[in-house]
Image (cartoon, rainbow, N blue to C red):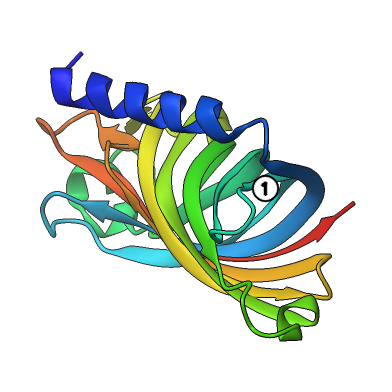
């Protein structure tokens, strides 16, 4: 493992351990929708964006007085896109239609840093804005059957987002995730791989 990455992980763990005694941890249920596309290395294949869904458990650990915290959880998320494989002879001759809908079923583990505006002279009890960002780890639990493609089994993403907290219980958030590693690749072309690009909209209720 790269020494810089290892050092960063150690610093994050140390930061969490140092503040965990005073941190306020809570859990909730989250659900939402996403709009995903697949970004290939070369613009050979056209891709149509597709709608997916997500649900799971969301955790928030905030450090009192400073507004900073950590966002973590365990989610199921369906991603995918529509690939126009049939537009190319090498795939059309194999029987693929003009539009092949691809599904990827992920177990998602986010680990994001967040900042919530909590010094609003009491108004934060009703409405508090927040921003967040960090890595997301995806484990592919299943996917469409498509012999033209090879799926990676998992991927790493980088997310940035923001939203509002309502009445200290509800959170409405929107985010964008860049896939940092490939999600799938074509079998018949050398190193022709694609990464996910995802818009998410989610609602979370904290108990």
Does dot 1 land on a helix, a strand or a loop? Answer: strand
Which quadrant would residue 201 be assigned to in this image?
bottom right
Question: Residue 49: percent from the left, percent from the top?
Answer: 43, 67
Residue 97 in sight in this render? no
Total marks shown come to 1
Q: Which residue is mark 1?
A: 60
* 165 horizontally vs 47: left or right: right
Frontmost residue, 91 versus 52: 52
Q: Residue at x 24, y 22 (%)?
A: 7
Residue 35: x and y, percent? 51, 66
Q: Give the quarter of the figure containing the N terminus.
A: top left
Left/right of residue 68 with respect to residue 183 in the rendered view:
right
Judge whether residue 164 can be spotted in this image. yes
Q: Is residue 47 above or below residue 129?
A: above
Rendered residue at 62%/32% (across/down): 20
Q: Nearer the viewer, residue 197 or 64?
A: 64
Q: Is 100 on the left or on the right of 52, as rendered?
A: left
Residue 168 x %, y %: 81, 68
User: Within the image, what quadrant is residue 149 found in?
Assistant: top left
**What's the residue at 79%, 77% (across, down)?**
125
For this view, does 70 lie left or right of residue 38? right
């Amino acid at each position: 493992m790269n020494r810089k990455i290892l050092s960063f992980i150690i610093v994050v763990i140390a930061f969490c351990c140092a503040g965990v005694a005073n941190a306020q941890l809570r859990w909730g249920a989250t659900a939402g929708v996403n709009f995903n596309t697949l970004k290939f290395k070369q613009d050979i294949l056209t891709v149509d964006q597709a709608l997916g869904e997500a649900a799971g458990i969301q955790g928030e650990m905030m450090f009192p007085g400073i507004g900073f915290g950590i966002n973590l959880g365990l989610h199921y998320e369906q991603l995918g896109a529509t690939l126009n494989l049939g537009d190319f002879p090498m795939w059309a001759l194999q029987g693929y239609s003009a539009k092949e809908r691809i599904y990827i079923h992920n177990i998602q583990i986010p680990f994001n840093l967040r900042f919530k505006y909590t010094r609003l002279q009491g108004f934060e009890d009703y409405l508090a804005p927040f921003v967040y960002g960090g890595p997301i780890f995806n484990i592919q639990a299943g996917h469409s059957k498509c012999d033209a493609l090879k799926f990676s089994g998992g991927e790493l993403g980088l997310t940035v987002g923001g939203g509002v907290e309502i009445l200290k219980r509800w959170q409405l958030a929107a985010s964008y995730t860049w896939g940092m590693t490939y999600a799938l690749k074509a079998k018949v072309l050398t190193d022709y791989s694609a990464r996910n690009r995802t818009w998410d909209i989610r609602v979370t209720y904290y108990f």
